[in-house]
Image (cartoon, grey):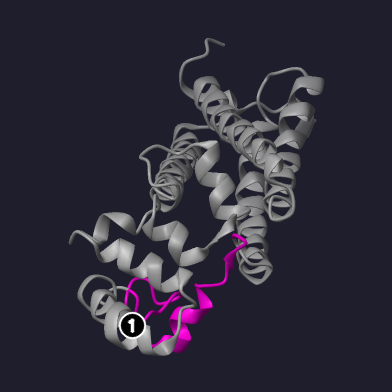
Amino acid sequence: MARLEDFRLSQLPLPQRLVVSLMLVVIGVGYAIATYNLYLTYNLTDGEPGLTVSDLRRAFYGRRDNTKIASKIHGGSMEQFLKKSGDKEKILSWIQDGADQKGYEAVVKPILTENCVRCHNPNGLQRFAPLTSYEELMVVTQIDRGEPVGLWARVAHTHIQSIGLIFFVLAGVFSFTSLKSGVKCTVIVLPFAMLLVDFGARFLAKFEPAVVYLMLGSGACMGALFGVLILVPLYEMWLKKA
């Protein structure tokens, strides 16, 4: 009687190999798109193109010597939308002068209405940060402390569960490759560990900016392991000689 631990992916009949292979390819494409979405979300956080440690530090730790809206319009991702000369300086001066409601109505509101409110409204793309009233604007004139804990919890619990399930599927397929047992066990454990480290670092970065290096490293490691979990089974099913 054949033992389960002796089974290898290369022994699968053609229809089953196709099913497993297409599943691996689709998951890989989905991960690539998710990575691109991550890049689009954070690459302009520090005002410069390209995803760097500076972007992650500003996104998760914040800029403690500045208010959130000031950091966005002066060297941040919103500066590009204030195209009229002097608009940025008017908002920064208003903040430095005490951010009173009279100055908001006379100076700041017309600038935001012209340049920002089309996205920063309850129904817009940036509805999580509306700027349609003085009260809403005052929320982002507080010190920029990065991602709030509530947002971290909301993102972390869904991503840990969903990515954990994806790793469960990939690791299950990978476990039937012909690699040595010790190698397989290491590769299987590491993605789950890196997932927890990544979101743990994302939480701790709010208190210590240097932790973003750990976040960057664990994310890169997790991406590399994703590739291993997908490419090795594909190689064994279609290219490796018996």
| 71 over 187 or under it: above or below | below
Mark 1 nearby-residue class (10 Å; few <14, some 14–19, many ≥20) = few
| Magenta segment boundaries in residue numbering | 120-146
| Residue 78 point in image, percent of width and height | 34, 59
- Rendered location of residue 129, percent (x, y): 44, 75
Q: In the figure, is residue 240 to the left or right of 158?
A: left
The secondary structure that most of the magenta stretch takes on is loop
Q: Quadrant of residue 53?
A: top right
Q: Which residue is mark 1?
A: 123
Quadrant of the image containing the C terminus: top right
Q: Secondary structure at mark 1?
A: loop
Residue 191 position in % (x across, y down) = 69, 38
The mark total stands at 1
Q: Residue at x 45, y 32 (%)?
A: 14
Is 84 one of the magenta-colored residues? Answer: no
Any part of residue 186 in sight: yes
Left or right, 51 with reference to 59 = left
Question: Between 93 and 212, which is closer to the camera in this rendering?
Answer: 93
Nearest the eye: 216 or 19: 216
Measured along the vertical axis of the image, is residue 108 above or below residue 35? below
Does residue 122 appear in this view? no
